């Protein structure tokens, strides 16, 4: 008799905050209190609120416990599971939430979840990703069954077109159209590929889908195979995602065992199988032609298009490549209909989008909202605003290919077209929030350093152009740039965009262009006034001691790692700027607030 | 997997096991499980409700959960039935047998078993 389920997050975030230990402790406690036969422990995928992990949810009450430590487990078992008393102090709730009469807080009522709408993530945090039966209980593989027995490939394509599903990898190409093109090319062998090479710094959407609901991706790939006439699929996933890789392997094995992958699926004569390919973590392999080259076993480099993969893709055969999140939407569209999907979102961007919220934000984590939700709702309502009462300065979407959205545009609706219009892009869904302490030049430099590293080197505009651009940015941050350099930088950006071979180079200057557009004054302050207004760029900083406040306690001098501070006991000290490495230790240690940076 | 029927069979069988997590039944049966309730025999009552509700095919509609001390310890095991728009019903001095009758007549049939209610015990 199982009367209660304890769901423990086994996503990467909670695993690193110790959820495995929590799970073991629960098992031990339940055993010792004689509840093992009544309470079932379920390891799930990501619940989304990674900042408050490890997260534990107890059903049927739906009580959401956050930041659970092994010491708390005994109390939860003896109070909640044995005696039915919710452990108030561990329940995640909004600060001003009233206590319900029966103590049954609902997680869906909290600000973090209230505005979310989960389609791609619907099973994440609800089912055990390592158990195909639980996926089937949530209508898993029913969409594949429906497609194989009731729909023609053209029906599937039409449904996706009517639904208005666009690629979630970032570019937003209509998925139905992509499948239609691949279907149109006649060939005995075609391929279905899945791009799980999520490489943007700060992005973990696809990772969480794979960790929380791997079967949804397998099922959609089989549907794609039926639609375009392919019997073979490849998932290209980063080797740095060990949990995702492991769960995909388990899922593929289970699906094969049930005959949901393999020969003659559902007795319809349709064959489909999937293989994994592990990527070594090159950002350029997220580009479709480079990814396919890498699957073939070659060095991951892009090639010019056309021919597009729909005509000549993997092994020169007609192929499609979709992103993990795109696939995660497909089965729901088949089951619930195009109209249902098209009822969410804006005119040209339908459905929902998953974002990985990171940076200077209270609720770091994974959220899924309908397209057209404003940036303000995501940051202030769902994300819980900026920590420490700081001011919101900008949000970065689209990773190294995207741009910065300034605070003045916080009411922008998030969809493909509005983000492009303001010089950023949807990207795969990384959303990094910045406050007044972030220097925008430094941010642009950070992303550019990433693209310089990740440029494959095949084409000159990207290989040399990004490197030169990075050098110019370095000049800005160390105060040696001139105003002409800013104009040259801008010109170089447009040149790289226009002439690079693939998406990596064509979008690499975006972080620079968008910060130049919205934060030009900050660039100019670096160049003209030789100051970094946010106090980040070390070369432009100076630590000084206010002689009126300094008591001559010598604490700073004793803690300075390079001996740059001198002075007599009980007399004001001074910092030698030539020796100072601007580590900031002195300012941290000073008890009188006498040291400031300028 | 050779047929859709096979898939449907697995789905039906699993649905009952996962329905707990939907946690949004229209009717909530809450069993008092504080020290007093457990001492008076609440555990078999809770067990009877969990199993009986599943057996009666009411899992999608009825959520069985537990709570702490309801306050009238001398009348434990106490079971309360909450239904949206209706006054809550409090059953006292429950046993597994009584639980089965409540499932049959109240949860399934919609008729309160008034002889077990707190009003009758007093």
Image (cartoon, coloured by chain):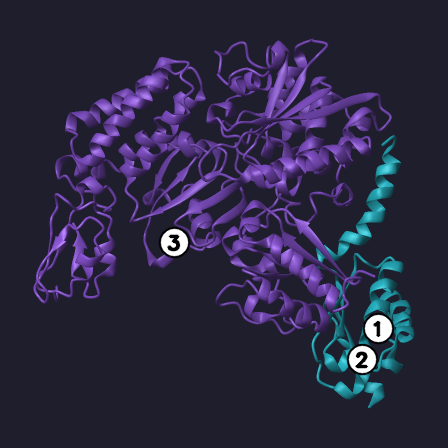
Q: Earlier in the sequence, mark 1 or mark 2?
A: 1
Residue A246: x and y, percent? 65, 37
Can residue A337 be seen? no
What is the x, y in percent for residue B6? 88, 37
Q: Residues within 10 Å of mark 2 (few under 14, many from 20)?
A: many
How far apart are the two marked residues, 2 and 3, measured between alpha carbons?
A: 49 Å
Evaluate whether label 2 is on the same chain as label 3. Answer: no
Q: Is residue A24 visible?
A: yes
Q: Which chain is purple?
A: A
Residue topped by disc 3: A386
Mark 3 or mark 1, whichever is nearer to me: 1
**How far separated are the C-alphas under marks 1 and 2?**
8 Å
The tag on residue B77 is 2
Residue A289 in percent (x, y) is at: 53, 17
Image quadrant for the C terminus of chain B? bottom right
Q: Secondary structure at mark 3?
A: loop
Q: Which residue is mark 1?
A: B45
Element on which disc 2 rests: loop
Which mark is drawn over residue A28? none
For label 1, the SS is: helix
**Crowd class of label 3 (few under 14; some 14 to 19; many from 20; radius 10 Å):** many
């Amino acid at each position: 008799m199982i009367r209660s389920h304890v769901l423990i997050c086994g996503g990467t975030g909670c695993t690193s905050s110790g959820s495995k230990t929590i799970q073991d402790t629960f098992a031990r406690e339940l055993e010792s209190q004689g509840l093992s036969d009544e309470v079932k422990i379920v390891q799930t995928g990501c619940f989304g609120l990674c900042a408050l992990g490890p997260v534990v949810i107890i059903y049927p009450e739906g009580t959401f416990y956050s930041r659970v430590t092994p010491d708390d487990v005994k109390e939860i078992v003896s109070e909640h599971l044995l005696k039915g008393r919710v452990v108030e102090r561990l329940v995640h709730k909004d600060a001003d939430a009233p206590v319900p009469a029966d103590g049954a807080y609902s997680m869906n009522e909290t600000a973090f979840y209230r505005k979310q709408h989960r389609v791609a993530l619907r099973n994440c945090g609800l089912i055990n990703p390592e158990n195909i039966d639980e996926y089937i209980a949530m209508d898993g593989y029913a969409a594949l069954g429906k497609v194989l027995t009731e729909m023609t490939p053209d029906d599937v394509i039409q449904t996706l077109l009517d639904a208005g599903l666009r690629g979630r990898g970032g570019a937003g190409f209509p998925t139905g159209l992509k499948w239609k093109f691949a279907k149109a090319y006649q060939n005995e062998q075609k391929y279905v590929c899945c791009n799980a090479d999520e490489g943007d710094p700060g992005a973990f959407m696809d990772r969480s889908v794979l960790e929380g609901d791997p079967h949804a991706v397998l099922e959609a790939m089989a549907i794609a195979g039926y639609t375009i006439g392919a019997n073979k699929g490849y998932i290209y996933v980063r080797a740095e995602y060990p949990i995702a890789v492991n769960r995909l392997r388990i899922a593929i094995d289970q699906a094969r065992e049930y005959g949901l992958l393999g020969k003659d699926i559902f007795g319809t004569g349709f064959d489909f199988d999937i293989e994994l390919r592990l990527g070594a973590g090159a950002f350029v392999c997220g580009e479709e032609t480079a990814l396919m080259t890498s699957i073939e076993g070659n060095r991951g480099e892009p090639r010019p298009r056309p021919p597009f993969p729909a005509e000549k893709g993997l092994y020169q055969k007609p192929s499609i490549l979709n992103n993990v999140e795109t696939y995660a939407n497909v089965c729901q569209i088949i089951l619930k209909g195009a109209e249902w999907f098209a009822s969410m979102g804006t005119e040209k961007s339908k459905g929902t989008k998953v974002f990985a919220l990171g940076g200077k934000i209270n609720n770091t984590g994974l959220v899924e909202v309908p397209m057209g939700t404003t940036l303000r709702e995501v940051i202030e309502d769902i994300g819980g605003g900026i920590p420490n009462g700081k001011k919101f300065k900008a949000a970065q979407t689209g990773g190294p290919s995207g741009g910065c959205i300034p605070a003045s545009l916080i009411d922008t609706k998030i969809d493909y077209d509005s983000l492009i219009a303001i010089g950023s892009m949807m990207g795969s869904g990384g959303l990094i929030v910045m406050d007044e302490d972030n220097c925008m030049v430094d941010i642009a430099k950070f992303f550019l350093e990433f693209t310089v590293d990740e440029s494959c080197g095949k084409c000159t505009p990207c290989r040399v152009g990004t490197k030169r651009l990075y050098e110019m940015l370095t000049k800005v941050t160390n105060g040696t740039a001139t105003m002409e350099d800013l104009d040259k930088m801008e010109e170089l950006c447009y040149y790289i965009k226009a002439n690079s071979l693939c998406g990596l180079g064509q979008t690499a200057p975006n972080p620079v262009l968008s910060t130049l557009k919205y934060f030009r004054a900050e660039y100019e302050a670096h160049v003209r006034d030789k100051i970094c207004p946010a106090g980040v760029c070390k070369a432009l900083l100076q630590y000084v001691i206010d002689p009126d406040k300094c008591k001559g306690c010598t604490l700073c001098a004793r803690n300075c790692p390079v001996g740059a501070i001198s002075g007599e006991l009980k007399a004001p000290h001074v910092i030698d700027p030539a020796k100072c490495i601007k580590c900031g230790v002195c300012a941290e240690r000073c008890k009188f607030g006498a040291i400031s940076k300028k | 997997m050779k047929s859709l029927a096979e898939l449907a069979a697995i789905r039906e069988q699993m649905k009952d096991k996962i329905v707990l997590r939907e946690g949004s039944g229209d009717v909530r049966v809450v069993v008092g499980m504080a020290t007093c309730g457990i001492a008076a025999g609440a555990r078999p009552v809770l067990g009877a409700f969990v199993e009986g509700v599943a057996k009666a095919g009411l899992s999608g509609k009825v959520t069985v959960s537990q709570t702490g001390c309801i306050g009238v310890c001398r009348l434990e095991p106490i079971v309360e039935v909450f239904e949206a728009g209706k006054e809550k019903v409090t059953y006292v001095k429950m046993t597994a047998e009584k639980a089965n009758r409540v499932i049959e007549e109240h949860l399934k049939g919609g008729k309160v078993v008034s002889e077990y209610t707190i009003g009758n015990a007093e």
